[in-house]
Image (cartoon, rainbow, N blue to C red):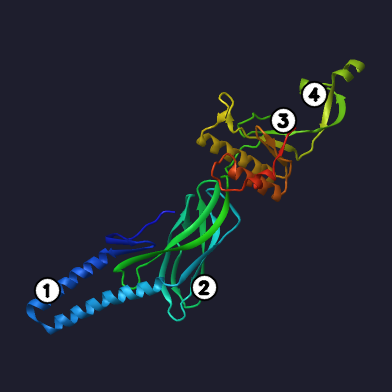
Amino acid sequence: MTVTSPRSILTISLQNRTLQLTREGFGFIIILFGVGLGAINTGNNLLYLILAMCCSFIAVSGVLSEMSLKKLSIQGEGPAYLYAQEPGSLKVKLTNHKKWAPSYSIRVKGAKSHQSFFLEPEPYFFFIPSGETIEQPVLLTAQKRGHLKITNCRLATRFPFGFFYKTKTIPLQLEMVIFPAIHPVKLPEQSEAGLEGEGIVQPRGNELYAIREFQPGDPLSSVHWKSSAKTGHLRVKEFQSQGLQNYTVFLTLTNPATNQPVAEEILEERVSEAASLIYHLIQRGHEVSLKTEESQTPFGSNEAHLTDLMRLLAFIGLEDGGEPPSANRKLIHHET
């Protein structure tokens, strides 16, 4: 998540807290020094009064901003999975646990995760009454497939005068599975066979419907030679069109020449292509199976099967995907 903060003159960091003096605050302090010098040199009571008021503004700014950040907790509620590079709905809930004091002008920034993502719009809470929870919907977009785990975030405020920019890091537990990115793909024709390792598909099994006389335009591959020899005329095999077919999506994870895993960039391209083919084929009602060098999944065409295949593809080939191995083993059965 990209973190932006106002231009600051001075930054102080202490464990889970930061304090930045903004340009507006620096300008106000310069004015404060000027008024102070004028008061000392002239002994003017009015200047001393103005100096006292300026000092009180700084003190009030520090106290109110500190109170706004106290006793706040945050929760994130989202779906169990999202597709990479596609925004998904997320609810950010900020709770004020103070008994009497409200919080003002709180921004949620810098959520910590090993996975790259961003939120739109940036969560902002103008007013959080004491003892209440305010909810704000945002869109979360993850850049890569795998396991998205957010462990904490930063709350930031410039309340009330913008002299100081304060942040506080608090826990935020949010986990979800990021499926591979889905792109438009050209679906194969019924007679098209794919190449292993390129994420292409291969149809399986039209049933023989009848044997009929040869007609101009019929392919020679469909000639039923045994029947033609008996009758003395060319006869061809006619297959019953199933409309919805079974497809096997091949995914090669290693380089055949070296028997080593393919480069990360090639792996991501193949996984995304395989996921896109599976997604679009199942959306059209076809039964689909995923096959790698070592294993193959059962065929299926419902949403649950699509989710299982996408979950498998979300972690396949990743060393630190974070998904328990048993979650993948439940889906695959090894060929014998």
Position of 34 with respect to 296 (left or right) is left
Of label 4 and label 1, which has the lower sequence position? 1
CA distance separating discs 2 and 1:
47 Å
In the image, residue 293 sits, relative to residue 286, either above or below, namely above
Residue type, mark 4 in image = Ser
Dot 4 corresponds to which residue?
Answer: 222
Quarter of the figure with residue 166: bottom left
**Numbered badge on residue 37:** 1
Q: In which quarter of the image is the C terminus?
A: top right
The location of residue 75, given as percent across then percent down, is: 52, 65
Quadrant hosting residue 234: top right
Tell me where residue 96 appears, x and y as whole percent.
Answer: 47, 74
Q: Which residue lies furthest to the left in this view?
A: 42
Residue 177 appears left or right of 97: right
| Residue type at the position of mark 2 | Thr
Residue 80 % position (x, y): 61, 56
C-beta proximity under 8 Å, tags 3 and 2: no
Please tell me which residue lies in front, 314 or 97: 97
Q: Which of marks 2 and 4 is in front?
A: 2
Mark 4 or 1: the one toward you: 1
Quadrant where the N terminus sits is: bottom left
Give the quadrant of residue 330: top right
| Amino acid under disc 3 | Ser
Instruction: Please report the residue visible at 56 percent of the width from the left and 48 percent of the height from the top.
Output: 322
Q: How far is disc 2 from disc 4 in space, using C-alphas?
A: 70 Å
N-terminal label among 3 and 1 = 1
Q: Which mark is residue 191?
A: 3
